[in-house]
Structures are given as C-alpha cells and as structure tokens.
Image (cartoon, coloured by chain):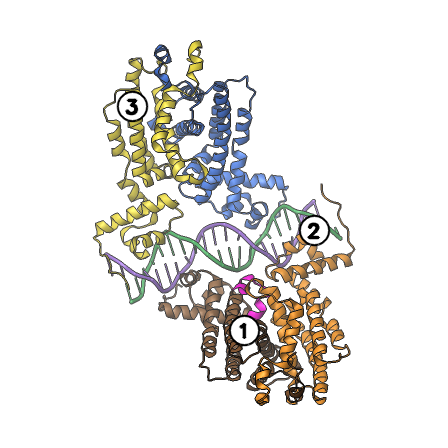
Chain colours: A yellow, B blue, C orange, D brown, E green, F purple
DNA sequence: TATGAATGAGAATTCATTCAT
DNA sequence: GATGAATGAATTCTCATTCAT
C-alpha cells in the first residue's frame, strides 16, 4: 500500500524541507516543531532530514538566508508616489500588508529570531534603514510642499506606520483568539487616516485652532 | 553535603523565584530556562518551586502580572476629566516606555518568545487583551464626550499606539547602529501628537475642510 | 481569619486520620491518595501525619487492623435461619450487602491489599473459612431435609453466592460508568432466585424432567 | 560502554515489550513498574518504549487486549445452535479458567490494581463491559428461544458467573491453606449446573409447582 | 502538638540526533 | 539516497518524608 516513493533531486528535497519547516515554524513556533513533524509533513523519514541539514537550527538559518523581505520591501518603496499623500500611503500600506501575508512565516519569525541571531539583526537593520530613508524623503518633500506639518518627524512617522501595520499583522496571526480581527483594507485605510488627520474631533477644534500644541 | 536549609517566608521566596525567573527568562528565553535552572539559581531544591507555583507557565504568568503595567495603566486612564487626552496619553506612553526600559531584556525576550511558545502567547495575549480593553474604554468615553472622532476605531488606535512605542523601543535596543535614537520624552510626545492631530498641515486644511476625509 | 484550631486528643486525631484515609483510599485508590490529600482533608499540616504514623503504609496497616469485616460477618452468619431457604438466603444476602456498604472502603481495599499484604490474607482467609463453614452447615441441613439437591456442593454454592454479591458490589463502586447499576434489593433477590431455581425455563423442562442432568 | 544496538523487527520488539511488561506488572504491580524498569528489562533505552506505545497505559491496554479472552469468548458464544446452553457455558467457563491460570499473576495483580489506579479501572472496565455484553447477547437469544426464563436478568447472570469463577480462582491462589481446592473441571461444571438448574431439589418441587417463584 | 517550608529521588515523557540496514 | 529503530539526556512535575520554627 506504500505509495510510490517520490524521488526528488537534492535541490528539490532541500527546497521542500525549507518550505515545510517555514510553514510549521510559523504555525507552531520553532521550539514546538520537532524534526519528526517536519519529516512527517515532507512524507519522509526523520533520518533523511540529516542528509540535508546538520541540525534543526541549520534549517532555520537556511530558511532565513533564502527567504527575505528585503527585495520585496525595496521594490514597494521604489514605487512612484500617487496623487495625494493619503493615496500614496494607503497603497504603500496595502503593499506592505500583502508582502507580510505572502512571507508570513518569515515575517513572524523575524522579530523572534532577532533576539538570538545577530545575523538576522544585521539583515533586518539594513532594510529598515533603507525603508525609513525612502519614506522620510517622500515625507520631507510633502512637508516642503506644505501638505504635512512643518514640525513632523519623518522617522517617528515611519516607525509608527510600520509599527501599526506590523503589530496588527502580528496580532492577526499570533493572537487570533485574543484580539479583534479587522479586514486588512479597512485596517490600512484607518491607520492612514489616523496618522494623517489624527484622532481628535476636528470639527470641534477647527474654530479654536489650538490643536498645533 | 546537604547545606543548611534556608527558610524564607513565603513572600520572600515567591519574590525570589519570580525575580530569578525573570532574569533567567530574559537571558535565555522561556523555553531554554528549566525549572531546575530556576531552582539552582535560587539555591533551592526543584520540588520547592512547585510549592509556590503550579507550573512553569504559572511563574511566567505571575511574573508578567507583576511586571505588567495594567494597574498603572488603569490608574492613568481613570484620571479625573480635567486632564486632557493629550496629557493622559502622554503620561501613559511615558509609563509604558518606563516599564519597557526597566524590564528591557524581559520585554524583548517575551516578544521574541511568542514566536516559539504557545504558552507565552496565551499568557501575553490575555494581558494584551486587557490592556487594549482598558485603553478602548477610555477612548470610547472620549468619543462620547465629543473629544475624539465619532468614527475612530479604538482597537486600531490602541494597536498603533503600542506599535509605535514598541517598534521604537525595539529599534533603540536591537537596531542601535542602524537607526536614529530619539529621546524617549520627545518620542512619546511626538507619537501622541501624531495620533491625536495627524500629520497633515491643519492650518492649510482648515479653510478648505476636506480633512474629515 | 484562621479558624480556631481544633486541638484533638491523640486518640481522636489518630482516629480522624484513619477514617479520612480510609475514605480517600476507597475513593481514589491507595497510590493516588497523597499524604497531602489526607492532611488537607483532615484540615491539618502534612507534617503532623508523621507524628501519628511512620509512613503512608502504616496508615493502611492500622486501617486494616482496626476495621474489620470479621465481627460483622460472624454476626450475620450466626442469625437463626428463616422459614424457607429463599427467605434465609435473601436475608443473608441483604445483610452482607449492607455490611459491604457500611464498610465500603475496607471492603474495596481488601482484595487489592491481599496482593501485597500477607497479614490481610490471613485475616480474610480466616473469615472466609468460618463463613463457608457456617453456610455449608446450613445448606447441608437443607439437603438432608430434601429441600436442596443431594449432589449440591455447599462450598461451590457459598463461593458463588459470595462471588456474585462481591463482584456486583465491586462493579457498583469501581466500574460505575461501565456497568449497569441494579438496585441492591432486587439484585439480592435475583441472585438468590438464580442460585435456587436456576436460569432455565422450568415450565418447559418440567414435563421431561431431564434437568437433573 | 555503549552496547551494540540490537535491531529487532517492530513485531518482535512490540511482542517483547508487552511480554516484559506483563511479567513486571504481575510481579510488582502496574504503578510500581516504571517505564525505565520495562526498558531495562528489555535491554533498551527508555525512549524506545515510546516508539511503540504512546504511554504506559497503552502498554497495559495492549497487553490486556492481547491476553483478553474476548475473541475466544465471542467464538464460543457464537457456536452453532446444536450445542446446548450447558455445553456452551461449560466451555466458556473452562476457557475463562484456563486464561486465569495461564496469566495467574497478572490476573491477580490486575484485580488488586483496580483498587489503586483509575487508569487500570478504565481499561479493565472497558473489557468487562464488552465481555458482559457478549454473554448477555447470548443469554437473551436463549431467552427468546424459550430455553431460559423470561425474567432472567442477563447482567446478573453474567456477573454471578464471573464472580463464581473469579472468587474460586482467587481462593485457590491466595487463600490456599484456608479453603478447599476443587478440581477446575468439576468446579466449572458444578457452577454451570447451579446457575442453570438451581440448588433446589427439582424432583420435589415439580409436583407442587411453587418453583416458578 | 502543630506547621508548612524544604528536600530529593524518581516518575513519565519528549526529542534532537545517530546509525545499521 | 532513504528508512526508521534506537539512543539518552533533558524536562516537567509528583510526592513521601524531614525538620526548623
């Protein structure tokens, strides 16, 4: 009854193991995923894993090296700006969310692995610097055009934007039973609105004008 | 070889276990810290730990509850109405930042540990839910008082607030060489201003009125 | 808030511990009952148990020595016979069942302890010999009176009677979720009827008469 | 010091573990036998046991299922109708006795172990339920065929049958010096006769007819 | 007498890893 | 390449028992 054994090339097998491990790590966490789990999900004996990787940690390392948010992130940030700030940021937010969804496993593991893996920190640090730089440049241009507040700190804006998106992504994927799920599109547009126009009731403030601190 | 039994009061021992565990969890992570490690660090037999806590998870729960700023948060949010939203949130943001600084390693580790351990997710998730609830209640009250926008989503606000602070904290502590360091006080007050009044130039918008979306 | 400590005399305390242990052993089994369980049920600290007993096994030993089915059983068997065999056996069966109920803990533990405790074997062996002797005498008298079959083996009858009652008692108390519960009165009368008149349909056999084998 | 790994087929190893466990459980009891004991007796690392069984209880379950005479019982009870009830029950009784003799120590220990361990109760209870069901079904069929009394309670019959056999077995093996030993064949046939035709002198009753209660 | 903190030897179980086949 | 039996150390947790107070 044993099904025909799929004889994969070494490359295919390596790929399969990494992809499978990525999914399991993201679902259950690194520690809670056993080599047996990975082997079973691959339809393969546990011993075989050790033909391709020296240890469980090696799988993680390979996974982090191979998959990266970097190129995608750079691509997103390089898009030409849209007509309004709101449109531009909404499109950026949606693109980031989409990327997070697509690389879910890696994205979720990223923060966690930064606690133990200096390599990961370097990689992520690089992209963050680039990302913040690109977004800052755009925001500064808008400031000069008078669209955004003179006293706006672009770095804080960028971090808050990223923080809002990432924490929501994290909440959706990790804290599922504990938090409210919000449709991504709405989430992004709400965050953008919040960051652009603020939470206070403008109608009430408008006449006074004491809002600029 | 049996050392003289040191008898501590339950309060002292409980305190000792929690503090010791906090240190070890921060250093090595939750999973990588064994009950035997904690017992040894306390200079105590492993069995004694179970005199005070039903399980390893209970230690974590107790620890997080003790370190958690939920009571502080409740206190701040329950302030008499004469304090403005800006003042209240600034105070809250500073309190959060202070807590993160005080328990720096633990805070960073816990965030990472959530990728690895469902138990941690459950415990932290519960605390997050409570925190979000507290903040949401406060925000809703402000909405009803007409201070905040009717259409503001308190959950999104809460997450963005937390995300902004935590990402900055994370950046300061883990991405040090790659990012700009901002003085915490200024950081908090800028974030609060951003979330309350938005990034757009209100002076310019005021006449037009297209700011209500 | 600590309630007034009940200062018991040593005898009362010993008695209390034995009674409490008996109940717990019967409910959860000997191994599954911890000294802490007993202490808690007594409203007393675990250490105190060791003032009265050298070990957990000692409690069991004391319990088995102190409580015994013997006197009660002898008393039951010494009752004068009733008018008919059926009445006599029914009354005997009911008395035995009542005794088992009253000394539930001990009765249930008896069989179990015989596997490890030679002392218990001796005690129980003695009573069984006595019981079988008394019942046999009665049955033999009934045989001579022509009421019971000439070829009836009184020992087998006695054992079957006891076995039927004890197994049912055991089933009621230990196998609760797995077996049908039968009201004791009905159970006893059914067993007596079965042992006296048999399971076969006499109406059908009567004409032939081949029932005596 | 590491001994050469002995590689057995899964069937051999499973068999070995079950037989070894059976011996140890019989000798020391279920609770008092540790997984390490079993592993050591098998000359194998403790972890290997879990390659074959999910838990210690599973070993017991497998062991009892394997030793259980349920299949044999079903076979006997399903005999073609030409066999009489007396023949069928005698065969069943002899089979039960044979099984008890073959697994003497295990059988005695299990009965005692039920006082100590809920797990054992659950596993054994399940088997008893199935056994009683099998016998009941057979008895009901005989009732419908008019062979057995309409008002016969099959559960009581089954329990009495089992009780008679087990108590005798128990007496033979544990109460040896105190009780009469009866040759098993005779014992079984006498019990069957007693349960089928009763203890009363039918010849005497036949004319009167007060036997139908 | 009485407390309950403290001990420490196991107990069951898990799992990364090895290696004979 | 591939299998899966086997290892063995580590881990959480239990509990009879001791002993300072």
Which of pointers 2 and 3 indicates the residue nearer the eye? 3
Residue C136: percent from left, percent from top: 70, 83
Q: Is residue D112 magenta?
A: yes
Q: Residue furthest right?
A: C9
Q: Residues within 10 Å of mark 3 (few under 14, many from 20)?
A: some
Residue beneath label 1, please? D107
Q: Residue at x 47, y 29 (%)?
A: B101
Pointer 3: what residue? A87
Q: Are marks 2 and 1 in contact (CB under 8 Å)?
A: no
Do residues under tags 1 and 3 come within 8 Å of each other at their CB atoms?
no
Q: Position of residue D92 (x, y in %)?
A: 51, 80
In this rendered view, identify the residue nearer to me: B165 or C101.
Answer: C101
Instruction: Label 1, secondary structure: give it.
Output: helix
- Between marks 1 and 3 in the image, the one whose residue lies nearer the viewer: 3
Relative placement, left or right, of C26 versus D63 is right
- Residue at point 44%, 60% (across, down): D54
| Element type where label 2 sits in the image | loop
In the displayed structure, A140 sits above or below C193; it is: above
Number of marks: 3
Residue A60 on the magenta span:
no
Mark sitting on residue C43: 2
A206 relative to C131 in the view: left or right: left
Q: Secondary structure at mark 3?
A: helix
The chain holding disc 1 is D
Quarter of the figure that contains the N terminus of chain C: top right
Closer-to-camera residue (A96/D188): D188
User: Residue C166 in the image: x percent, y percent?
Assistant: 63, 72
Q: Is residue B14 visible?
A: yes
Q: Chain of mark 2?
A: C
Q: Which residues are magenta?
A: D110-122
Looking at the rendered structure, whether the residues under marks 2 and 1 are on a common chain is answered as: no
Kindly report the secondary structure that dominates the magenta region of the rendered protein.
Answer: helix
């Amino acid at each position: 009854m044993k099904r025909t054994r799929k004889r994969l090339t070494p490359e295919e097998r390596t790929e399969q193991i990494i992809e499978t491990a990525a999914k399991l790590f993201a679902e259950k966490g690194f520690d809670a995923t056993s080599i047996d789990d990975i082997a079973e999900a691959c339809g393969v004996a546990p011993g075989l894993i050790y033909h391709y990787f020296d240890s469980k940690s090696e799988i993680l390392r390979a996974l982090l090296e191979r998959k990266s948010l970097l190129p995608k992130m750079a691509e997103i940030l390089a898009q030409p700006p849209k007509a309004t700030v709101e449109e531009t940021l909404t499109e950026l937010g949606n693109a980031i969310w989409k990327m997070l969804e697509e690389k879910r496993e890696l994205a979720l593991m990223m923060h966690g692995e930064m606690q133990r893996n200096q390599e990961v920190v370097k990689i992520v640090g690089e992209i963050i610097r680039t990302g913040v730089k690109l977004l800052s440049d755009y925001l500064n241009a808008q400031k000069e055009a008078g669209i955004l507040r003179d006293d706006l700190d672009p770095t804080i804006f960028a971090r808050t934007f990223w923080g809002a998106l990432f924490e929501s992504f994290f909440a959706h994927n990790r804290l599922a039973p504990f938090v409210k799920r919000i449709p991504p599109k709405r989430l992004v547009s709400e965050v953008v609105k919040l960051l652009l126009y603020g939470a206070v009731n403008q109608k009430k403030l408008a006449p006074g004008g004491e809002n600029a601190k």
